[in-house]
Each structure stands twice: as structure tokens, then as C-alpha cells.
Amino acid sequence: MKRVPASFVPPIAIDYHTKTPMYRQLYDWFRRVITDGQMRPGQRVPSTRSLAAELKISRIPVLNAYEQLLAEGYLETFIGAGTCVARSIPDDALSAQASKARKGLQEIVEKMGPRRISRRGAALTHVPTQSWLDNLGAFRVSLPALDHFPIRVWSKLVARHSRKPTRGIMAYGNAMGQLSLREAIADYLGAVRAVRCEASQILVTTGSQQGLQISAQVLLDPNDPVWMEEPGYPGARQAFMTALAHLVPVPVDHQGMNIAEMIRRGHTARAVYITPSHQYPLGMTMSATRRMLLLNWAVRTGAWIIEDDYDSEYRFGSRPIASLQGLDTDGRVIYVGTFSKVMFPALRLGYVVVPKDLVSAFSAARDAADIFSSTLYQAVLTDFIREGHFARHIRRMRMLYMERRRALVKAIQTQMADMIEVIGAEAGMHLVALLPPGTNDVAVSRKAAQKGVSAMPLSICYSKPPTRGGLILGYGGANAHQIHDGIRKLRMSVQGQIA
Amino acid sequence: MKRVPASFVPPIAIDYHTKTPMYRQLYDWFRRVITDGQMRPGQRVPSTRSLAAELKISRIPVLNAYEQLLAEGYLETFIGAGTCVARSIPDDALSAQASKARKGLQEIVEKMGPRRISRRGAALTHVPTQSWLDNLGAFRVSLPALDHFPIRVWSKLVARHSRKPTRGIMAYGNAMGQLSLREAIADYLGAVRAVRCEASQILVTTGSQQGLQISAQVLLDPNDPVWMEEPGYPGARQAFMTALAHLVPVPVDHQGMNIAEMIRRGHTARAVYITPSHQYPLGMTMSATRRMLLLNWAVRTGAWIIEDDYDSEYRFGSRPIASLQGLDTDGRVIYVGTFSKVMFPALRLGYVVVPKDLVSAFSAARDAADIFSSTLYQAVLTDFIREGHFARHIRRMRMLYMERRRALVKAIQTQMADMIEVIGAEAGMHLVALLPPGTNDVAVSRKAAQKGVSAMPLSICYSKPPTRGGLILGYGGANAHQIHDGIRKLRMSVQGQIA
């Protein structure tokens, strides 16, 4: 490091032994002294020749630095007057006083507390720290059995498409998704979920969360009332909050969301968010009566129904319940699903079945959100479905999750029967374990997270504190040993918290 | 196909030669006659034995169908009374009259015109058909030279991470992105763009579009004024529209957005969207004076600055202009960038540099939007940057695009000098070709699209029809031959449209 004093400019600090190129050091130095106000507008800078001589360096880096500073407007050249600090840089912006004033402002800002962001931004931030999501241990909700995923088949398909990618795999894709994948999804949903749709109605998303947010954006104006299941899926709440909708919690009973009561009282809504196949998180199935009631009410009042058909692939007692969408003859149902759990979460692919007249609006909203989904995985997933791997994988996982569920229920019965009551249908990838009345389920979850166990507190699914807390226990990603060990740790976590 | 009449149920149509399983046909049939009202609530259904005999099939599919219908609540079993259509299905919902009434409603809906969606949904749909985006021909804006991408290196890295994926590559990831990638991005932006940030401030997105939409969601309430460059980037307009912001067009001059005039008149805004390095689409660089003025005004009024630093990698005359973010000492600048154009669009990875106190809000908004970015490509990109391929690729593309730009300018000079005026700095991946006054640029673009040439009309970058139309011509994805041929076709497209 060598400091070169100069009569007309502040001392320039040049480091001859760093990797930072010389021109860059000069450029940085000039920019700093100009913005700090150490060099004044109109002040002449040394000629490139004299500065190079003074610093004992070649003229080239000096020329480069000046060229850059000129291009950015920090310096100006006047014929006959040489190169000067730009005169048009406002005094107050650049003087040392201004610099101090700005620092003062910053302190004021810091003292004034949080800076103003949007209502929605503030609301989204008001979620407690979810420490139970920090680990991938036993009972992590929505986590599938990753070690049972046919990774060899999958990575072969990945290689097939990534080694010699088509332009389509690399360039901009369609906002609605790749046609071949949309066709495969439409076929799958028609056969397995009795969804009535054409490929043109399928919007490929990055998962159900994006499907929910885009649905909210297309359908809802600020303060529009939306009926939400109570308890319900927190991700959906977040999605509708970003559209500034007015969330109306509607209690669930053994048949799912109790819409009969709402309709009887004459309440209306712009949209209803609902998980009819397998209520989140409690697991009941919406009865046929309620389904028809809901559809007729929607047609009568012009409300939209957003059907989240999560986990419908896994039903251990009877065959999967057909979708609500399949009963809808009026295009009132927006059907949302995801591959995150039947495949793996980092795939980031899901879908929305959109009523025909709303396709252009959904497509435009997707374009505004993030243009389109990564195409490599779309192409790979299409092959995975078309070649039969998908159906095979679901069948295998259905058996595996049935066993895991049984193992979890048994572990609870033997180790925690005195403190936990299990609810939830024989379906999906999680069950709900109710805790003794008065137990703080968030505290239990935090405690469990410290032991590497991920147990989601039931109370975060409520808009108001529930009368009884509980834990949502995922069993997709945990084997028998992990389940047994996890329940042991959970027992310890609960013991300290029982009121 | 055999129709079996039955005294107590409508004729059942069973197809013995289809792939649809028998139980499924039965299930579908019962569901239809129940919802259509052809079978009434409380009506007894045949015993499984008699139905099987009647249809001359095994009892098993009949049992399966009934089991399913019972699980879904279409049927009920009463001890001693056998199996009946569920009594609780409301008459009005299921009767033939109701069915007709619903069909009538549907007709009314169709006659009433478009069904009500959100203001934002309707506004997003009001974009003219962009037929010039239907092809990947010459001049497609934002399309890089895909055939010069080092695909062998890339697919080796893809294979490395996809063959034996870690749990991290498959499970749920961090809403802000993978730490290793965030570190690589922070290092890159610090070195090349003089961005001042830590890895903790980097939000990995699916591209700059998502960065813009999330910024809008976090920062803006409905009707909050946002200054937008006029002309400006249409994608940004869409992103701010989804947050229902009030867009205020601010004209640009040779120094970029003319904020001086707005500030002098005392106008305020919650946020400013700006492309200071390379104005979109016209290409000028914002002067140092304006930058300082903008920053000081933002601190004084509490406004946010959203800096979109697109295409800053490619500057052919001088070295890249440093970012506005690097001059900001008050955390007022949200810096948005993307890998879509330096890498390839289908990568779907970009980033936002977030002021420290807003990190939790941005993270929550990303979580609400689509949880996190696909991890495979994050891991691959990290290696690609860390192993030096990224810097090498940018250097090569800089040379290539400089040549392609030169070829395009020359082709215009020789073939279209009489009808086109080229503007736009020596930077980026596109230039603007102004058309003769009175020429309808959208019509020209449509015409060109028919010939397989993608030329974006300048007028779509304006909020009000501009006095002079033009074409935005991308040269990243077109080689010398394609450029020459494209200009020939463009000449023909323009000729028919000159007023």
C-alpha cells in the first residue's frame, strides 16, 4: 500500500499487491471522493499523463478509469479546460455536509422503528417463527419418502433431456406450461379424480401455493369475502392475504366446512377455499349433500370455489373420493393440485384446472407472476408419467404410507395413549394428535424441534386460538425406526408442557 | 354395449368391451342418475347379488362401486332396510327440475357476458395478443445465443447433482434460496456491479419478473403511486398492476427518467421503478446527477427505489456502469436481476438484493408466492459460477453480441436506412429501430410474425400511444445469416405499413 499525496486531489491510496485491477482502484477512489464531496463539482482532475507518472503506473488504467467516470457522468471534459468533476452534480447531494445530513436521516429512520411497507407485507411478516420447519426430522408435514423415490429412473430421464436440450428446453416457454405435460395431467386427473377438463384448461404452476396465489389474484379484489375452513391450511391463508381478501373463517364439522349454516344465514362470499377430499388438517371428507349444496349456492350467488385436492392420491380405506370439480357443470370450480408430495417437493410443479372462460386471465396472471415454469422438469415429468413410472410410484407409496401410518398409530398407542387422541381419516400423509386441554402446542413443537423432531402445532391452522391444541404429524418421510424414536422424543416434549 | 332394463332403476348401460373397469362404470352411472335426480333420495338400490346377476357380472365390481358410493355419501345403509340413495341429499339440489334450472342458469351466465373476476385479473387480460412472441425467430427480445451456451459443461453439472441427489436437492428448501448460491451471487454482484450486500440479503427468485412482483407486494398498498419510466418495461407494469398500485408514467430523456421535473413539482411516490444502467427499451444511462438526486429524494420522502439492472453484463463501449444500489447508504434501493439472459431463460433463476430490515417481509412474501425455487438448478448454477464457467461465458457472449449488434446495424444501414432510425446505447441485447412517423408498429410486428420474425412493437412500452412507433430488435439469439434474412423480411413487413 502506497499513499501518494497530491496538491490538488486528496491522497490516493493505491494497493500494488491486490488482485483488484488498477483502473478499478482508481475508479472506486474517484467515485468515493466525488460522492463524499471531497472533490467539488467543476474541480479539475489531474491529466492522465501526470497522474500515471505520479502513481508510477502505466497510463492505460488511468485512461480506463477516466473513460468510465466520464461515461457515468462523474467527470466532464471541456475543450481547452481538460477534465473536471461534473458541474451538474448538485452541491447539496455531494457535499460533506449533505453526506452527514444523510447519515443523520438514517439515524432518524432507525429511531423511528420499522419503515413503512405494504399492509400485506406487514401482515405476512406477523407469523411466529416456525422452528419446526428448520429440520427434516420425523413427522415433517408434507415430506414424502424421498429414499423410496425411483431416482435412477428419474435421473436417466433428466440426462435424456439435459444432454442435448432442444431450444424449447432452454428458451422462453408457455405461461400455461408445456402442452405434452398439460395433456398428461388432464388424462391423469380425468381417470383418477373424475376431473372434467381438456389440456387447454391446465395451468402448470410451480406448486399448489402458486396455484392458490394466482387464483386469488385473478378472482379477488381487496376486501372481497372468502370463506376459509377453520381450522384450515395456513398456506392458503397467506395466498389470499396477498390479494388483500377478507378472510371469513367457517368452522368445520365431521362433514367438512359447515357451509349449510352460512348459506342459511344468507352470508355471501366471492370465493370459497375448500379441501373436500381430505380436510386440511383434520382429514374428514365432505359429504355429497354438502357438495351439491355448495355447487348450487355458488351458481346462484356467482361465487367461485377453489378446490385444493391435496393428498388425494393416498386413501387407504376406500378408493379416492371423486373431485368436486367433476360434479360442477357451471365452471365455478378452480381445481388446484401439486406434484410436490407424490413426487418430491423440490420439483416445484403443480397445476390448476381453470374454467374455460378464465384461461386467458389465469395465463396473464401467471405471466405477471413469473412468466413460466422451468421446462426441463416439465419434459422429464411428462416422460415419467407417460412411461408408467408415476402410477407405479403412487401405488408403492400408498402401501408404504399405509404401513407408516399404522406404525405411527401403534407407537402413539403404546407410548402416548395417555396424552394424545388421534384424529384424521385413513388418508393422506399426516394425522392430527390432539393434546390434553390447556397444553400449549406451539411450545411443544418448539421443544420437539430442539430434539430434531418436526411436529407442526395445530393452532397455527386456526385464525383464533382454538380450545384444544394438537400436533400435525406427517408420516410420509419417516421409517418405522424414526417413527418410534420420534414418538419417544415427542413424549418428552409434551410431558414438560402439560398444564 | 348392452342395456339392461330394471324395474326400479333407470336402465344401466354397461360396456363389456371397454378398458374402463366395471366397478368404475357402475360407480359413474349411479353418481350420474343420483345427481341428475333420476334416482330419488331414500330410494332403494338393488342388492349387490341381484344387480350382479342382472348384469351377468361378478359381485366384486358391484361391491366396490357401492363401497365407493357409500364412502362419498351418495348411498346410505340402514340395518334391515338395505342400501338406499342418501336421504340427506337435498331434493332441490338433485331433482331433474333442479338440474334443468342449473342448465338455465348456465345459459343466463353465458348471455350475461364475461363473469366477474377481479379488477386486476380483468386489467391483466386487456393486453393485445402478442403474436410476435409466438416464434423464436430473429430479433426475439431477451433471447440469448442458446447454441453458444456451454451445454456439455452444464449437463455434466446437472448429472452430478441429479444422479445421487442429497435430501436438500429433493426436500423443501429455503424461501430465500440456497445459501451457497446466495453467497456466489453476493460475491458476483459486489465485484462486477459494485452492489453492497451480504449473502443474507439475497433472495433467489424464479427470475426478475418474480422479483418485481414480490417487491410490489411487499412495498405497495392499492392505489399507492409508483413512478414508471415512459416508455418502460411492460413486465414491470404487469407486476405493479397485480399489487393494484397507481402507475404514474414519467417521461425519459437522454439521461433516463426525468425525475428532476417530478421532484421540482413536488410530486411524491411510494416507489420508483427504474432501469438506470440501460433504460428499457431506449438504452440510455442515468447520469450521476440524477442518481444522487433520486437517492436523496427517496431518503427525504421515504420512497423505495426498485432498480432493475437487466442486461448490465453487456456493455460494449465502456465498462459496465456501477449500480445505483452501490451508491445507496440508506437501504432505499431494492436491486433486481436475473440469470435468464446471461444463462438461458428456462433456467428460471433470478435474484433480489433486499435492504436488511425488509428481509423477513420479502422471505414471507416469497413463501406465500410459491415457497421456494427448484433446488437442482440452484446447486448446478452455484458450481457453474464457482468453477469459473459463468465469467467465461459472459466474456464470450460479450464479444459475440458486440459482433451481432454490428451485423444488425450494418444490415439495417444497407437494407432499411430509408425507413429506420436506430437508437439505443452500445449495450445489452437489443436496440430500438424507430419507424417513419405514422407507421403502426403493432401491425408491422404482426406482419413480421407471420414471416417467422419476432419484432416487438415499441408502442407496447408506452402507457399512452406514442407519437412515433418503432421496433425493439433483439440480436442475442440471431446469427449473421438470420439477421440478414430477418431484416429482409422486416423490410417487406414495414413497406406495406408505411402511412
Image (spheres, coloured by chain):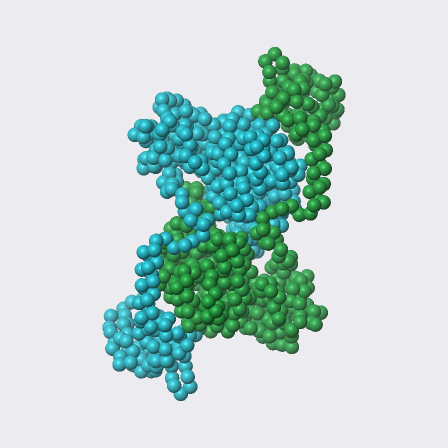
Chain colours: A green, B cyan
Position of A338 compared to A43: left or right?
A: left
| Residue at the (43%, 42%) spot, across then down | A171
> A409 and B228: which one is in front?
B228
Q: Position of residue A467 (x, y in %)?
A: 62, 71
All told, the count of numbered labels is 0
> B129 and B152: which one is in front?
B129
Q: Position of residue A47 (x, y in %)?
A: 65, 16
Q: Is residue B427 above or below residue A260?
A: above
Q: Position of residue A102 (x, y in %)?
A: 69, 35
| Residue at the (42%, 51%) spot, across then down | A362
- Image quadrant holding the C terminus of chain B, namely top left
Position of A375 compared to B440: left or right?
A: right
| Residue at the (48%, 65%) spot, across then down | A267
Query: Looking at the image, can residue B341 be seen?
Result: yes
Give residue A130's quadrant in the image: bottom right
- Image quadrant holding the N terminus of chain B, namely bottom left
**Residue at the extreme bottom of the image, as rendered:** B80
> B164 and A462: which one is in front?
A462
| Residue at the (53%, 60%) spot, across then down | A247
Q: Position of residue A136 (x, y in %)?
A: 60, 59
Q: Is residue A398 above or below residue B435?
A: below
Q: Is residue A277 above or below residue B128?
A: below
Query: Looking at the image, can residue A59 be seen?
Result: no
Q: Is residue A210 above or below residue B190?
A: below
**Residue at the extreme top of the image, as rendered:** A80
Give residue B19's quadrant in the image: bottom left
